[in-house]
Image (cartoon, rainbow, N blue to C red):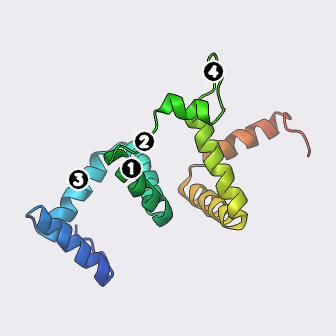
């Protein structure tokens, strides 16, 4: 099977550089990527895509690089000390701080640029719908409707 991929000149240059850094041709590099993708589980592949989406955010990537520099230079705060300083804990608290931080980041994003966030949400819903990810939810809703278990809003 022959597959044709149209790459922008910039992407083609990056592809060649990455392949050359490994001492292989661009074609070998692409074949290795395809093998990797085909061997991965759907969950792994989705995780990769999510990671790439996150890392494509230039503002986030810049903050991540800055944080990594701070760690390398020892400019870090102990996690337990940071939690106490933020005033989020009582020693016996069962709060999941990692989840709390993610929720706070999501809220800040919505507050700072709600229109962009809703556009992203709409785009993700459209992609999920087109890919069939929402089919089970639709089937479940239709089944609940048939059983008369849905309430009018």
Q: Residues within 10 Å of mark 3 (few under 14, many from 20)?
A: few
Q: Which label sits on residue 76?
A: 2
Q: Could you say where residue 52 lies in the image, as x and y percent from the top left? A: 41, 57
| Residue, disc 4 | 94
Q: Could you say where residue 144 lies in the image, as x and y percent from the top left? A: 78, 36
Q: Residues within 10 Å of mark 2 (few under 14, many from 20)?
A: few
Q: Nearer the viewer, mark 1 or mark 4?
A: 1
Vertical position of residue 19 compared to residue 129: above or below: below
Vertical position of residue 4 compared to residue 108: above or below: below
Q: Which label sits on residue 35?
A: 3
Callout 4 secondary element: loop
The answer to whether marks 1 and 3 mark residues whose Cβ atoms lie closer than 8 Å is: no
Determine whether, in the image, residue 147 is placed left or right of residue 37.
right
Determine whether, in the image, residue 124 is placed left or right of residue 51.
right
The residue positioned 35% from the left and 53% from the top of the image is 69
Is tag 3's residue or tag 4's residue first in the polypeptide sequence?
Answer: 3
Vertical position of residue 37 compared to residue 86: above or below: below
Is tag 2's residue or tag 3's residue first in the polypeptide sequence?
Answer: 3
* Residue 29 position by quadrant: bottom left
Q: CA distance from mark 1 to mark 4?
A: 29 Å
Is tag 2's residue or tag 4's residue first in the polypeptide sequence?
Answer: 2
Q: Nearer the viewer, mark 2 or mark 3?
A: 2
Q: Nearer the viewer, residue 79 or 14?
A: 79
Residue that lies at the very extreme toward the left in this rendered image:
23
Q: CA distance from mark 2 to mark 4?
A: 24 Å
Q: Is residue 6 visible?
A: no
The residue positioned 27% from the left and 46% from the top of the image is 39
The answer to whether marks 2 and 1 mark residues whose Cβ atoms lie closer than 8 Å is: yes
Q: Could you say where residue 121 lies in the image, as x and y percent from the top left? A: 65, 59
| Residue, disc 1 | 70
């Amino acid at each position: 099977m022959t597959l044709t991929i149209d790459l922008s000149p910039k992407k083609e240059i990056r592809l060649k550089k990455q392949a050359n850094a490994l001492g292989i041709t661009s074609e070998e590099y692409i074949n290795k990527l395809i093998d990797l993708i085909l061997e991965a589980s759907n969950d792994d592949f989705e995780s990769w895509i999510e990671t790439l989406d996150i890392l494509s955010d230039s503002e986030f990537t810049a903050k991540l690089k800055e944080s990594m520099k701070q760690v390398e230079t020892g400019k870090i705060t102990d996690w337990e000390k940071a939690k106490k300083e933020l005033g989020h804990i009582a020693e016996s608290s069962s709060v999941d701080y990692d989840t709390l931080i993610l929720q706070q980041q999501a809220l800040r994003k919505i507050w700072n640029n709600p229109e962009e966030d809703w556009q992203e949400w709409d785009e993700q819903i459209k992609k999920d719908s087109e890919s069939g990810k929402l089919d089970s939810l639709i089937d479940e809703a239709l089944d609940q409707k048939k059983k008369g278990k849905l309430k009018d809003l």
